[in-house]
């Protein structure tokens, strides 16, 4: 199902909608998972993105995926939150050798850092999804993920110089 919908999204140029769970591309997060997300990235990325990459290399989904993440960072707080969450998930998959490809970490993390800093005020006033848990909105989730990046990879996504 994930792969079939991704193939449709590629054809319709709706990969961002697929990643964000919009317009019929939603895969609900299991009720037992303690997370508030618009779609289940743990399903759509391995069973969609990675499956298409392996089975249909001519679609160049790795490039489409990375471009979609970069474009999402130019969007509203929801788009930025989804991009941040997926990038975090992707890097964990890469570290575990569970991704069949790697994203351009320098390019993606540099833009992510710039985007987060530039949009801090908006993110602090966004209280949807994981933002509901924090008094500082989704920025609280940014701080949480930044701490994970620091402990796991020794980099900060909010104060790192990606030159």
Image: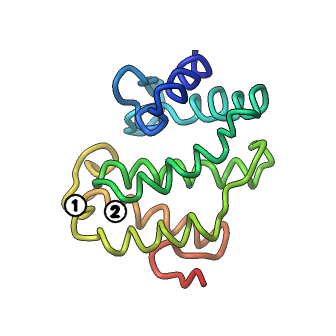
Residue visible at 40% across and 31% down? 21
Q: Is 56 positioned to the left or the right of 80 in the image? A: right
Q: Is 106 positioned to the left or the right of 80 in the image? A: right
Residue visible at 62% across and 21% down? 3
- Residue 23 picture location, percent across and down: 34, 24
Residue visible at 74% across and 27% down? 56
- Residue 123 picture location, percent across and down: 27, 62
Mark toward the start of the polypeptide (1 vs 2): 1
For the residues labelled 1 and 2, say whether their Cβ atoms are less than 8 Å apart.
yes
Near-viewer residue (141 or 19): 19
- Residue 81 picture location, percent across and down: 38, 52
Locate the C terminus by quadrant. Answer: bottom right
Picture disc at residue 140: 2
Residue that lies at the very extreme toward the left in this rendered image? 125
For disc 1, the neighbor class at 10 Å (few under 14, some 14 to 19, many from 20) is few
The image shows residue 38, relative to residue 7, as above or below, that is below
Q: Is 4 positioned to the left or the right of 70 in the image? A: right
Quadrant of res 20: top left
Name the residue beneath numbered marker 1: 135
Residue visible at 74% across and 33% down? 58
Q: Is mark 1 on a helix, strand or loop?
A: loop
């Amino acid at each position: 199902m994930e792969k079939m919908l991704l193939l449709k999204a590629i054809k319709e140029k709706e990969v961002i909608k697929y990643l964000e769970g919009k317009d019929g591309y939603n895969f609900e997060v299991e009720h037992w998972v303690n997370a508030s997300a618009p779609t289940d990235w743990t399903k759509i990325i391995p069973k969609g993105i990675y499956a298409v990459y392996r089975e249909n290399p001519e679609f160049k989904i790795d490039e489409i995926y990375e471009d979609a993440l970069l474009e999402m960072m130019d969007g509203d707080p929801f788009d930025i939150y989804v991009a941040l969450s997926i990038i975090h998930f992707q890097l964990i998959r890469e570290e575990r050798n569970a991704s069949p490809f790697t994203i351009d970490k320098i390019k993606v993390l540099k833009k992510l850092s710039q985007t987060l800093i530039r949009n801090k005020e908006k993110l602090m006033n966004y209280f949807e999804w994981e933002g509901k848990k924090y008094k500082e909105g989704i920025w609280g989730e940014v701080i949480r993920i930044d701490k994970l990046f620091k402990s796991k990879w020794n980099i900060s996504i909010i104060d790192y110089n990606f030159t």
